[in-house]
Amino acid sequence: MRCKRTLLAIIASTALVHAASAQQKPDKVVIGYLNLVNAQLVTKALGLHEKEMGVPIEWVKFGSGGDVNRAVAANQLSFGGVGGVGNPPATIGIGRGLAYRGIFVLNMLGPVESLVVRTSKQIEKPQDLVGKSAAAPFGSTTHYLIIVYLRGAGVDPTSVKLLDLAPSDAVAAWLRSDIDAAYVWEPSLNKMVANGGRILMDSGTMATRGYPTWDIAVVMDDFAAKYPDYVTKFVKSECAGVDFWLKKPEETAAIISKELSLPLDDARRMMQGTGVVPCDKQLTDAYLGTSKAKGKFVDTLVATATFLTEQKRLPKVESRQSYEDFITPKYLEAALGK
């Protein structure tokens, strides 16, 4: 009888373990994204998250980084990323105490984000923007860079009428001739260039001047605490999308073309303006670094916070530890078996 009771206890214990394991599977995963040219569109189009996680995925499109931060504050997302969490929005989120962590480099920003000016206005240099109307999504990478660009040239940003417009709204304003310039990303950028615009500055050039910008995927703290294995699965799927982008550029261009309703040649061109970082390289000092030694993304966050504080977009610069805590490579390390 004693053996039987012991056996029954083991069976019951095993059943409880299996039940607990079954409970550690989310009903669905919600991912916030922007229609920006990077490998996450590949992941989305190929259903890589659905295949890896085995749960329904809900993709929610946002207009800007500020929109994603507001959704995070309202507990509407499991994951957020793409242009929604570039280094300026991430810095603002950290300063406002948003409970999320940066876990994966979606892209480094180059000419895919640019400052377009109206050719007819004869804007040849930053000083020519004084008195003009310019658009950028406030709190985004491009809002940060247009202010840096103006200040670097000795132009007071308040001398330019800066309007808070999402890229699609900026296109509409451009077509109405309501604005003279806009710092936005593709595919909205190309619509302005095709309708009387030209590029005055781009994010790749600004990076060479010491102002790199990037987009990072983030996970909500409560989701990560409850479903850590699914965070690793998310990162593994994103790595599969990156590998596809790097190894199959023509097939990737076809996906981007379809996802963004673009001509194939435009998709190819836009891909050239986006830096997609191989997953193993993301764990080097130039990017996330490792759990034991965080990389230069921390330095970028501190520099961005300093700038935003000077611009009174943030009340203060947080401790360096706060920015180190935000950068969380452990899920990528797990996905790569490091």
Image (cartoon, rainbow, N blue to C red):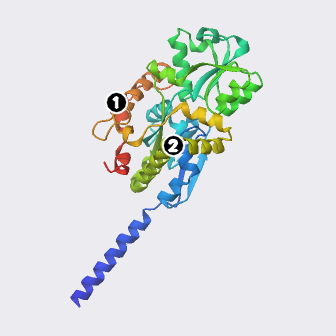
Q: Which residue is mark 1?
A: 320
> Picture quarter containing residue 114?
top right
Could you tell me the amino acid type at mark 2?
Trp
Residue at disc 2, secondary structure: helix
User: Which residue is painted at 50% across and 50% down in the image?
Assistant: 78
x, y (%) of residue 152?
50, 12
Depicted 249 relative to depicted 179: above or below: below
Q: Residues within 10 Å of mark 1 (few under 14, many from 20)?
A: few
Depicted 147 relative to depicted 171: above or below: above
Depicted 230 relative to depicted 281: above or below: below
Find out whether the residues at labels 2 and 1 contact each other: C-beta distance under 8 Å: no
x, y (%) of residue 315?
46, 25
Q: Nearer the viewer, residue 275 or 68?
A: 275
Residue at disc 1, secondary structure: helix
Residue 32 in view in this figure: no
Q: Residues within 10 Å of mark 2 (few under 14, many from 20)?
A: many
User: Which residue is painted at 36% across and 49% down in the image?
Assistant: 336
Residue 288 in view in this figure: yes
> Picture quarter containing residue 70?
top right
Q: Which residue is mark 2?
A: 245
